[in-house]
Amino acid sequence: MTLEKFAMTTDEPTWFTQKRQASFELIDKLPLPKMQRFNFSNWQLMPSTKTIIKTDVPTTYDDYVLMDIFDAMTAYPEMIQKYFMNKVIKSDENKMTAYHTAFLNQGIFLYVPENTVVQKPIEIELKQDSQQPFISHILIVAGENSKFSFIQRTRTEGDAKSVANCVVEVMAMPNSEVRYAAVDEMGENVTSYLSRRAYVDQNAYVDWSIGLMNSGNTVADFDTDLFGEGAHSEIKVVDITSGQQQEGVNTRVTNYGKHSIGNINQRGVIMDRSRLIFNGIGHIIKGASGANAEQQNRVMMMSNEAHGDANPILLIDENDVLAGHAASVGQVDQRQLYYLMSRGIDRKTAQRMVIRGFLGDVLVSIPSKPIREELVQTIERKLADGQTVATNS
């Protein structure tokens, strides 16, 4: 199937078909995304796809618009053309963004108009059919002075070998407040590329709470660009790896605006023979006086055969700023284990209690109660499965 025939199945506008074609021609010319200390160049991340999946969501609510991305191209053409892979993330940034644009097969558009406060969280659940590549896009536009929470759950159905290429773009207009929470649970046979990024305008606030609970190999790129004066972002990432899984996570905040604030807090637990790399990147651009960039990257190893790395990076091009970082990689505190076991608690339960305490600092800071509770349940399940694998091996 040619790209033109593929695009016809969406009944999409000409400009988007042309954008697909232009991106397709760039794929072989662009490099892969850069990720320090993590090489994924030999991963199979870009098979062709022939299926378009319409996302089954209502088109409008009283206060906001939530609809299929392809329907939105007709209903909101100017807004989609202005923001889709054009301002927050660009199609020609790297090989993966070009592939994403060329072969996009499903997505969601959320628009919350200016001066709108949505009281209840906006929730979606995306299910990947492992028989098809999952090329998914979420575009969120937060109007000036708007305020809302968005919860995303993503899961794989089936156990076929597949790929996922998922992009989230958040455009936060001045004085808006966006609280984004996600739990990713891609299957063991799914190789994933995940990109989430926000453009944060003057005095706007974006809070990211991300639970990376995938079972397959994953490369994740989480970026926030603080363009406006007084822009603020908090990024919290919880990650657990097991088996022979490999995950590389780039979490970056770039301070462009004066008095902007960007904080990163990442916690990971690695089991069995898995590998997890946390790169925390804080970049303060020249002219961003009064900016603040703080980060924590901590990894706990549950196995002598696991490999973890917490790599903090600060790039400071301005003098009048605050910046700092903390990083650690280590095994379970044996003194804590001994204390718990001396109180009659078995070793497996004691280990899980120590891990919950280790992750607790991030979990309690997640503003979404449903996501906190779901993450705790998912963490318990992954830890129990990991301990079972370790015992059997």
Image (cartoon, rainbow, N blue to C red):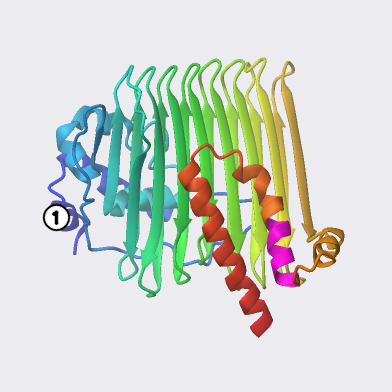
Residue 390 image position (x, y, % from top left)? 67, 78
Q: Helix or strand or loop: what does disc 1 sit on?
A: loop
State the quadrant of the C terminus: bottom right
Residue 28 image position (x, y, % from top left)? 41, 56
State the quadrant of the N terminus: bottom left
Residue 172: image quadrant is top left
In the displayed structure, 210 sits above or below 330; it is: above
Q: Is residue 15 left or right of residue 158?
A: left
Is residue 25 in view?
no
Residue closest to the eye, 358 or 203: 358
The residue at which mark 1 appears reads as: 9
In the displayed structure, 353 sits above or below 253; it is: below
The count of marks equals: 1
What type is the residue that disc 1 sits on?
A: Thr
Residue 281 part of the magenta segment: no
In the displayed structure, 62 sits above or below 84; it is: above
Q: Is residue 320 left or right of residue 86?
A: right
Residue 348 image position (x, y, % from top left)? 71, 71
Residue closest to the eye, 136 or 334: 334
Residue closest to the eye, 300 or 284: 300
Q: Main secondary structure of the magenta part?
A: helix
Q: Is residue 247 left or right of residue 101?
A: right
Callout 1: 10 Å neighbours few (<14), some, many (20+)? few
Residue 19: image quadrant is top left
Tell me the magenta residue range: 347-355
Q: Residue at x 62, y 71 (%)?
A: 386
Residue 162 image position (x, y, % from top left)? 39, 69
